[in-house]
Amino acid sequence: MAGQQKEHGPQGPRGLGWIDLPPVWLAAALVGSWHLRGIGPDLGAFGLAAGGLVAVAALVLVALAVREFARHRTTVVPHHVPAELVTTGIYARSRNPIYLADLMILGGLSLAWNAPLGLALVPILWWILDRRFVRPEEARMSGKFLAGFDAYTQRTGRWL
């Protein structure tokens, strides 16, 4: 996309390349949750309905977030520095709606798959996303957008 600057080389931070992307971490957690199907209490129709609603809401969050980045003609790619600080739309409510959506997808599909033990993977994925992506991105944003980013953090929560 126009206006993007890479923070790291072609292999990403520490040479991890394509594996160090949030969808890869999410996929790994989903595989773990899938293998926990049927272990624990049976959630039945409630799990399917509630999980489906949460997963659909997560996809809406992703669409709204990507639309905002496209409107501002800047990158949504982790490890790249956006050309512009996006604080409008869904980003006025959450600084990290896509990462929040990742957590919702994991939780929602764990419920829908009748894998309640898979919900234990949500805080693990949260920790990975927070340490590997959110905090480094915030450091880059603070360095580039200075007081504008600091003001944004004062009025908009990291997650909600």
Image (cartoon, helix red, strand yellow):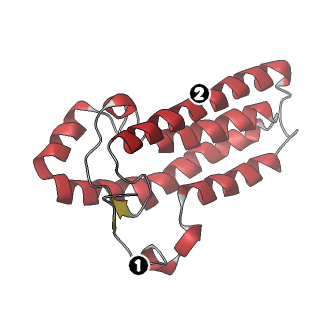
- Give the mark, 2 or 1, whose residue is nearer the N terminus: 1
Image location of residue 26, percent across then percent down: 62, 52
Give the answer, above or below, for where 21 lies relative to 30: below
Pointer 1 local density, CA inside 10 Å: few below 14, some 14–19, many at least 20: few
Q: Secondary structure at mark 1?
A: loop
In the rendered image, the vertical position of residue 10 relative to residue 33, given as above or below: below
Residue closest to the eye, 38 or 11: 11
Task: Classify mark 2: helix, strand or loop.
Answer: helix
Quarter containing the N terminus:
bottom left
- Quadrant position of residue 42: top right
User: Which amino acid type is shown beneath numbered disc 2?
Assistant: Ala
Q: Tell me the residue at 34%/69% (across/down).
A: 7
Q: Which residue is mark 2?
A: 57
Relative horizontal placement of residue 154, taking residue 88 as reference (left or right): left
Residue shown at 35% from the left, 58% from the top = 2
**Relative height, residue 42 to residue 37 (above, below):** above
Q: Say which residue label 1 marks.
A: 9
Q: Nearer the viewer, residue 44 or 13?
A: 13
When asked about the image quadrant of residue 50, the answer is top right
Q: Residue at x 25, y 54 (%)?
A: 141
Residue positioned 30% across, 59% down in the render: 3
Task: Give residue 93's position: percent from left, percent from top.
Answer: 35, 28
Looking at the rendered image, the quarter that the C terminus falls into is: top left
